[in-house]
Image (cartoon, rainbow, N blue to C red):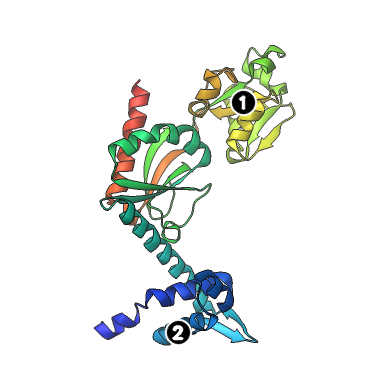
Amino acid sequence: MDDLYQRRLLPSTSMLIAFDSAARTGGFTSAAEELNLTQGAISRQVRALEDQLDVKLFRRANKKITLTDAGRTYAREIHLALKRIQTASLCVKTNPRAGLLNIAILPTFGTRWLMPRFPSFLEKNPEITVNFVTKLSQFDFGEEGLHAAIHFGLPDWPDAASTFLMQDELVPVASPQYLKRRQITEPRDLANEPLLHLTSRAQAWPDWLAASGVSASQGQGLLFEQFSTAAQAAAAGLGVALLPKFLIHNEIERGELCVIFDKSVPTRSAYYLMVPSESVDYAPAIAFRDWLQETIETESAG
């Protein structure tokens, strides 16, 4: 590939910024307002970009613009590339020796388990700048620009290496006040209780009851999308929840929730660290993986 052709494939930053803004805002005028430039300047930058690439990125009709199919694809990639440049520039400006680590976390795991322990990671790795993004389901690592993700489920993420972290050990819990009003002495007594379900673990209660020799629940139940809401509902006395014991340690310590039967049922799903194939040798991702494993092993041994 000759130098002239390579230069054609590397447009100027000003062209790319103008195109990105116009693509996101849907017009040259709105892009001009966003970038504090004139509408004409934006139009000229985009036209120059199209000429350099020899590709039409916008359709122009009746003083309106719409992205072409090629423009839509290009806009997505350029926006991601500009975000990466911006983040990398901020990182090197604030800490010239830093490594950058972009992590996707599950909201409950992040707030209840990871954040209270994370200062030790920063203490051991002060040169690493960490950005957190909340994700509830699988995503495309390449499109999101993330180096790792905490994942609950099976280690079946495409083009990513998995590291097992911990099992999802669910135990039935309720508030002390709720238990005072009920006669719950064995698992079959739960069959007539209102059970609090999580949408992400729809089979959890049936599996736990079956493993305890209980055929089915006859009680009225409630369904929750968020773990924290289910925990709050249980603490408020709305019923019995089946929750991961390691994530409700604080509620148990404060006496807001009581473990009714300290019996968990193994599930196929577990917590994993997922790292895309392009980041498996990336030093900050390796440091994060090693710290997670060390922290979990230390707490398990204790």
Given residues 243 and 104, the one toward you in this image is 104
**Could you say whether the residue bearing mark 1 is in a helix, strand or loop?**
helix
Q: Which mark is residue 50?
A: 2
Amino acid type indicated by mark 2? Glu
Residue 200: percent from left, percent from top: 58, 40
Residue 181: percent from left, percent from top: 72, 13
- The vertical placement of 51 against 270, above or below, is below
Q: Which mark is residue 209?
A: 1
* Residues at marks 2 and 1, CA–CA distance in whole angstroms: 63 Å
**Could you say whether the residue bearing mark 2 is in a helix, strand or loop?**
helix
The quarter of the image holding the C terminus is top left
204 lies left or right of 221: left
Amino acid type indicated by mark 1? Leu
Given residues 262 and 41, the one toward you in this image is 41
Callout 2 crowding tier (Cα within 10 Å): few <14, some 14–19, many ≥20: some
Looking at the image, do the residues carrying marks 2 and 1 touch, with CB atoms under 8 Å apart? no
Q: Residue 127: name its quadrant.
A: top left
Closer to the chain start, of discs 2 and 1, is: 2
Residue 112: percent from left, percent from top: 49, 33
- The vertical placement of 78 against 273, above or below, is below
The quarter of the image holding the N terminus is bottom left
Q: Nearer the viewer, mark 2 or mark 1?
A: 2
Residue 227: percent from left, percent from top: 58, 35
